[in-house]
Amino acid sequence: FPLPPEPNLTPAEVIARAEAIAPTLVARQAETEQRTFYSLDTHEAFLKAGFYRILVPRRYGGYDFGIETFMRVVVALTRGCPSTGWMYCLGAAHAHAVATLFGEQAQDEMFSAGDFICPATVMPSGTAERTEGGWLLNGTWGYCSGVPYANYFVGHTLVSDEDGQPEPMMFAIPRSEWRRLDDWGQQLGLKGSGSH
């Protein structure tokens, strides 16, 4: 399995990086809200700092630092810009869910890049149709915080069981199979949370 880019990085160091970045976000709050998500250079700073690997299992080149470290990074970033903190949190937090709920084959594919951004929705939407090779998913899933730089998306839909009753289905889709709609920013607060 690959080593993370900085094998000796510690939780304290990654938290210190977030605390150092946070003050740079304050003056960019209005710009972030106008764009509706944090800037590409902020995203690149997060990549360099290792933030998108905090919850990725070590076997996939992540740091596997755990929820406490992750949340301390989220809190630090949120002090600089609440929208940025929200977008980062809900884009990167689902590494924990994928490592917990998905099987090894899915994890091997989804964590292959090391850096992991995978927002999720809570409300079921769209349709799922059985096909010969699996499922055909179609729909629009709204309010998906953290999607602008995501490499995967986790969504939910309802499928009928053998008795025709709806049951929830959870799925993951790689970036190449979906597109972000520019449909965020008209709400009150957190206009820069990337919740497209």
Image (cartoon, rainbow, N blue to C red):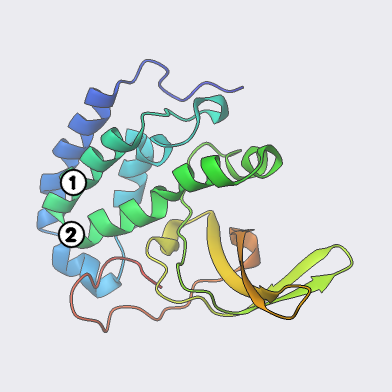
In the rendered structure, find residue 75 and report the number of the disc placed on it: 1
Q: Alpha carbon of mark 2 to alpha carbon of mark 1: how far?
A: 9 Å
Residue 37's quadrant in the figure? bottom left
Q: Amino acid at mark 1?
A: Val
Q: Is 44 on the left-hand or right-hand side of 107?
A: left
**Which residue corresponds to mark 2?**
82
Q: Is 170 on the left-hand or right-hand side of 148?
A: right
Q: Residue at image x 15%, y 69%?
A: 30
* Residue 106 visible in rendering: yes
Question: Crowding at label 2, few (<14), some or many (≥20) Cα neighbours within 10 Å?
Answer: many
Quick check: 110 above or below 195? Answer: above
Percent across and percent down for residue 55 are 42, 37
Judge by depth and name the residue closer to the eye, 36 or 58. Answer: 58
Picture quarter with the N terminus: top right
Q: Residue at image x 24%, y 24%?
A: 13
Percent across and percent down for residue 42 are 29, 50
Picture quarter with the C terminus: bottom left
In the rendered structure, find residue 124 and report the number of the disc placed on it: none
Quick check: 128 above or below 52? Answer: below
Question: Crowding at label 1, few (<14), some or many (≥20) Cα neighbours within 10 Å?
Answer: many
Q: Earlier in the sequence, mark 2 or mark 1?
A: 1
Percent across and percent down for residue 11 are 28, 25
